[in-house]
Amino acid sequence: MGIVSGFATLFSGWEPVFFAILGTAIGLFAGATPGLSASAAIALLIPVTFYMETLSALVFIYTISKSASFGGSIPAILFNTPGTPQASATQLEGFPLTQQGKQGKALRMAVIASAAGDTFSELLLIFAAAYIAIYAAQMGPAEYTAVYFCAFLILGSVIGDSIIKGLLSTLLGILLALVGFDPITSEERYTFNIDYLLEGVALVPLLLGVFVLSEVFVRVADRGSLIGDQAIAPKSAKPEDNRVSWQEFKDCAPVMARSTGYGTVIGMLPGIGAAVACFVAYAEARRTSKHPEKFGHGALEGVAAAESANNATSGANLIPLLTLGIPGSTAAALLAGVMLIHGITIGPSVFVTSHDMIYGLFASGLFCIATYFVVGYFGSGVIGRIIALVPAQMIYPFIFVICYVAGYALRQALFDLALMTLFGVVGYLMKRFAFSVPAFVIAFILGSGAETSLRQAMMLDDSGLFVFFQRPIALMFFGFGLLVIVLRIRQLRRQKGERQLAASLSE
Amino acid sequence: MNRSARNDAIAGAIVLAIVAIFGPWTSEIFVDPRDPGFGARDFPVGVLITTAVLALALCAGAVVLLARSGWRVYEPGEAAPLLRYFLPMVALGFLYVWLLEQFQYLLPTFFALTASLAIFGNRGAVRLIAIPAGVTILFYVLFYGVFGLNEAPGEILSYENNWYFRPFRTFLGLS
């Protein structure tokens, strides 16, 4: 059993366990701090992982991403401000419960649902990923090209309200990945006669710029939106308002099971992520509820649906990363970055070349869930009160400076810092103009692999682009990508029609 | 005013500018005519053309909407937060990098922290002097002492931290 050896690897020394606990704690606080997303916290800490052994580095990053997903629900419930985008649906029902003095009940339901969804997703990852990897290992360059094409189409079309902007974000990421030596012939491309660019654009300055520095720029340009000092509504004195009863748990269990399913499936698709999963699950919970009238006024089912769905994406989005080398989310892309930095080849072969380490990582996932469950069940309110004490206008200047010190740690090159500042501006513009930063970053990571696969497929066969028509699996992936984009266009048209109808009715 | 269309037009124009920057450099990519399959230039050309087509589509759609809304593209005072807070913060970022090159870590970091706290609206000696000084030293010990990051010598002011951080790292049991 791989997972048993994974636990043995995790507990073989103090370091991996220590970093699992530290990662969980950092993730909870980072998730609970509005404006500091899990991606930003991870990007900020990636340079620190250079100084760790590989397993500790992976465990550290993975546990931050997992616990931050739950951490985001704390300010969503207590302050009506989601700590992370995936907690946006939780706030719809969680904050009304706080206004009724039932924040203890809401927070405990959030942590139960989060742990339930996350555990299922992690177990699926543990038991299914290796089997999928066996099939993935049999695929050739043509099939991989189709998988990349499919991933780019999904990335470009699903995030945000504009398919054109999504696709442009993806293409800009691919364009940036072309800078440096050509992967096949080693010809110089787009280096603009700058020696630092010969090896390509470094990943860490890019991540720090578009995820962290851009957030500082967004916040400074919008100073009025800083949350400042927050006051938590008084807690109810009744014990039943501060715990989840067995009956309430039983009522919410079917919703949690369904939402976990939605979250797991959505998590496996590249780029869509937890922010979409939580709204899909919330809308379904509302539609199928016996008491839909309670939604919007503090329905516990709504909290359970959103939280189990957004945490269920966490393990599932590692499945495409570890089996195909394609990150399912921003957090998975960042984990891929750490793997590349530590010399681990991403893809199905990872189960052979780094077997113990991968199962050690999975074991750390389960350990993290247990840790954040205990801390979250008994200490969410305390975390909320600590976050409320720190004024937001103090947090961002420190993040700004840490960004530069961390960016310098990679190659100790000031050029990287200038590049990071430039990417900070790029990230700011992308956010302002509603482009997709995750699609941009994931496409940057995948760009080189996509080009290599395409050119290898063309070299191995004389039939040119017709090589793809001779491969059924490749055709299936091309077809799936196109189907997703067609369905998305139809969905956007329908939404536009509904908006126009609502506007005409209101007039 | 149709702000969304205005933003789309600007975004499309920026993307076209990026294509215009990368475009001429594409012809500089060496291609060996004997290479089988796609050469080093083909994939970049494909990406650039697709990007340009989509950017033009974004611009065209936005221009049509702007024309319908009577070409109103700016509201008075809209740029004020950008000029007062965003641009100074970006300038501070580039200035900080330049100062690091000239004076190494300590002085530029204290300055950058104080300046960014001020831009974010913090006031008073505690927030603008005491806290930045403490945090600058804390980060210095953490990154350069504990993690052993090397400082490149400053071009104007150079100092060597090895003589005090080396015993410190040895004391902590770090190599």
Image (tube, rainbow, N blue to C red):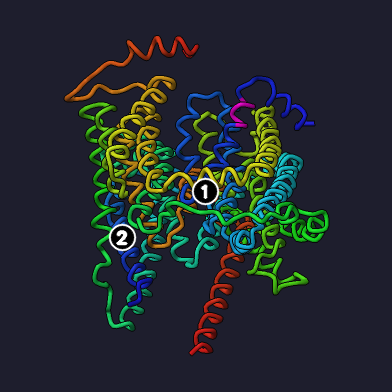
The residue that label 2 is drawn on is B14
Q: CA distance from mark 2 to mark 1?
A: 29 Å
Q: Residue at x 48, y 53 (%)?
A: A230
| Residue that badge 1 annotates | A454
Magenta segment: A16-21
Name the amino acid type tagged 1.
Leu
Q: Residues within 10 Å of mark 1 (few under 14, many from 20)?
A: many
Provide the chain ID for the residue under circle 2: B
How many numbered marks, from 0 up?
Answer: 2
Question: Which residue occupies 61% across, 66% down?
Answer: A483
| Horizontal relation, residue A327 to residue B9: left or right | right
The picture places residue A214, in percent across and down from the top left corner, at: 38, 49
Above or below A497: residue A321: above
Question: Magenta stretch: dominant SS?
Answer: helix
Magenta run includes residue A319:
no
Q: Residue at x 68, y 48 (%)?
A: A111
* Magenta-span inclusion, residue A19: yes
Mark 2, other Cα within 10 Å: few <14 / some 14–19 / many ≥20: some
Q: Where residue A490 sits in the image (x, y, percent)?
A: 58, 74
- Quick one: A182 or B175, which is closer to the camera? B175
Q: Which mark is residue A108?
A: none
Residue sitting farthest toward the front: A237
Q: Residue at x 40, y 41 (%)?
A: A399
Which part of the image, by quadrant, shows the N terminus of chain A? Answer: top right
Residue A246, picture quadrant = bottom right
Q: Position of residue A413 (x, y in %)?
A: 32, 30
Tags 2 and 1 touching, CB below 8 Å: no
* Viewer-side label of 2, 1: 2
Which residue occupies the extreme left position in the image? B156
> Which amino acid, by three-letter code, is at mark 2?
Ile
- Report in which chain the residue with disc 1 lies: A
